[in-house]
Amino acid sequence: MAEEKEMVNIYIMGKHYQVPYGLTIMKATEYAGYRFIRGCGCRGGFCGACGTVYRKPGDFRLKVGLACQTVVEDGMYLTQIPFYPANKATYDLEELTPTLGTLLQHYPETTRCLGCNACTRICPQELEVMHYIAAAQRGDIEKLANMSFDCIMCGLCASRCPAEIVQYNVAILGRRLYGRHIAPRAGHLAKRVEEIKAGKFDAEINRLMQVNKAELQKLYDARDIEP
Amino acid sequence: MYTQDMREAIKIVEKTRDRRLKETFPRLKPEEKDQLLRSFHPDYMPGTMRPVKVGPNKGDKMPHEHVDLLESRSTLDPDTFSLEKIAFDVDVLVIGGGGAGTSAALLAQEAGADVLLATKLRHGDANTMMAEGGIQAADKENDSPAIHYLDVMGGGGFHNIPELVAALVKDAPICIQWLESLGCMFSKFPDGTMNTIHGGGTSRKRMHFAHDYSGAEIMRTLRDEARNRGIRVIEFSPAVELILDEHGQCAGAVLYNLETEQHLVVRAKTVIIATGGSGRLHIAGSPTTNHYGATADGLVMAYRAGAKLIFLDATQFHPTGVAFPEQIVGQLVTEKVRGLGAQLVNIEGEQFIYPLETRDAVSSAIIRECRERQKGITTPSGMCGVWLDSPMIEIIHGKGTIEKELPAMFRQYRRFDINMAEQPILVYPTLHYQNGGILINDRAETGIPNLYVAGEASGGVHGRNRLMGNSLLDIIVFGRRAGKNAAERAKSVKLGRLTLDHVKRFHEELNKEGLGQKVAPILLPDYRGKIS
């Protein structure tokens, strides 16, 4: 297959390789002979391990993509940023209150945002990073949580921020504050947990554990299915 | 972007859509399902398995790829490797930094243990992170753990180990509540009621989710909590061998720092294997949804130490892997797409299977549609697939639902210029999950004293086929149980002299059979110079 394919030229950390057209950066790098240790995780766009920056000839702009989700282009001049040092506050979520004060106490640098929008421009998930940081500055935790929800914590935003904010860590604090302290608790869940602890279902489950396969199959086939 | 031919084929799907919206394809009768599986499920494909010649499962048939690893030598030479210099001396060693390992570490620490978590890649690089669809728990009024029990058993072909299933379904609501209290953002209604839907093989709507980043949300929350609590984590340092003591108890592991290429000896009173699955072995040559590190390391190590494996001959193929575009072939299209109403449709625009049959059945039906009936759609690279009619979701639940409820899927396709809210997507089964693994009991214990297993590395709970949403559940339920029990146990453990004698004995067994030319665990797949 590979021989028949059109080849493109890429430069991995400045070194030239020819790889088949149409591959993702990740697969092209492997085709070129690399075996990843860092810079490769889920290979499906969820883990943030493979943030990659690149430039193309004649274009001053720095571009960005996840290596596992971005197709190579001729002349691409690339490197991965598999790790970037980040400031992570530690906290006991239980004791926190969902307020602006809590956000700023843990990440005071949030107020240093210059509004340059570099974070939003670089985000491979195309999130409105600067706007969720603005929500954080206002103490709007629900908005911070929802706007940042699709964040994969790749760290590219933090690598570009002139104010040295670690946006994704501010965001996860916001989401955990929201999930723990703002979103209403599921009443039916609490009730069911009490019932289980009281042993309400033990007898029925014990009975099912004892019946033979044929009997179980019969019960299974006769289940009513919620529409 | 679709080719002209594919765009023409889509017109047929569009033409039948209005009619199909009102149609419910009949469910399979038990004997039909049995026949379908035997004829088309990859587990039954001739030539894909052989009996393993050594170890506790000697004579059992398993996929070649697993047998190859189980019949390999250690990366260490047990005659010369020194266990004298102990780098870490802890109560509980957790091997694996996914959902099961992190849950275990949190619970072990809560129980007062000194915990070390070692992981091959970064903390959180695991299949947990990629689980999109959701997590099951019977917490609604019309549901009960007993009904959940029946669904799990039926899904697993009634091969599941009852005590494990009972633990799974009874702990489920407790685990969801634990995650809720850690701040996990489950999708809820304004009054706090969990938004829940069906998955394949469920009789109640008990699939909880966080958009389609369910596993990612759980994983990053657990990881954040572990970081807050200061749990020690060593990244890029997989375990390559278990250490036993002179009495045959598990007593630690040898880690290998992938970057410095140095070995580290960890002595631990109890060890928890949470190394996940094996999709990167590419069983039967299949592409996979799995993360980069899914190479069955835990199975290999535990097997050498004498642990029994179960149901390793049952591999789960997720019915809806990407068949087009080529760049992301084999990646996951969450079952939630069908849970929200999208049907599977052939080249004639007709349904051929009830969309929420169990995964083994849906996968088999798609394979039948493409291979036997020749009603699949062929891609430019020669791959075959069937349509998953995603635009139906927008008609059933309203415009914008896909972008809101399936943001990861929507983004994945948009990156390749396909708008799944307007165009159907092409899918084919992909290697997804290791149904079996190391045999455990409901305390997550193995047959080896002080060795625990949790998550995909374990076997028994799902029988021969896992239901959607029971894997995220499994890792939390048994991760927590393993952590708690291992920490309790560690309080009374007295370790003897550390040895690798079990590795020596295993090597002798290999030599007798003329095996052991290769080494394992392999730690990472090797795609150098290839198109993976």
Image: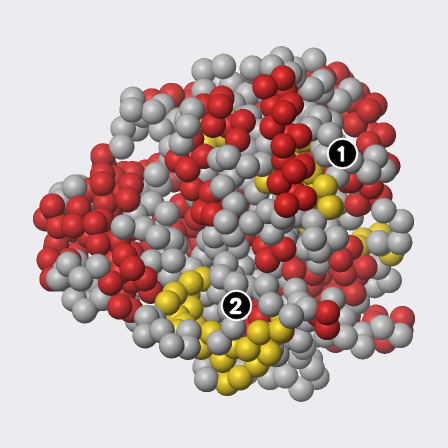
* Closer to us: B169 or B327: B327
Residue in the picture at 19% in, 52% down: A133
Percent position of residue B144, x then y? 52, 20
Q: Nearer the viewer, residue A200 or B293?
A: B293
Residue B164's mark?
none
- Left or right position of B517 against B120: right
> Can residue B412 be seen from the camera position used here?
no
> Which amino acid lies under the numbered mark 2 shown in the image of this protein?
Val
Q: Which residue is mark 2?
A: A72
Q: Could you confirm whether marks 2 and 1 are on the same chain?
A: no
- Left/right placement of residue B431 relative to residue B492 reads right
> According to the image, label 1 marks what residue?
B365
Q: Label 2: few (<14), some or many (≥20) within 10 Å?
A: many
Q: Chain of mark 2?
A: A
Tell me the element at label 1: helix
Amino acid under disc 1: Ala
Q: Is residue A188 above or below residue B278?
A: above
**Residue at 35% from the left image edge and 28% from the top image edge:** B188
Residue B86: image location, x then y, percent: 49, 78
Is B500 rendered above or below residue B174?
Answer: below
Above or below A159: residue B377? above
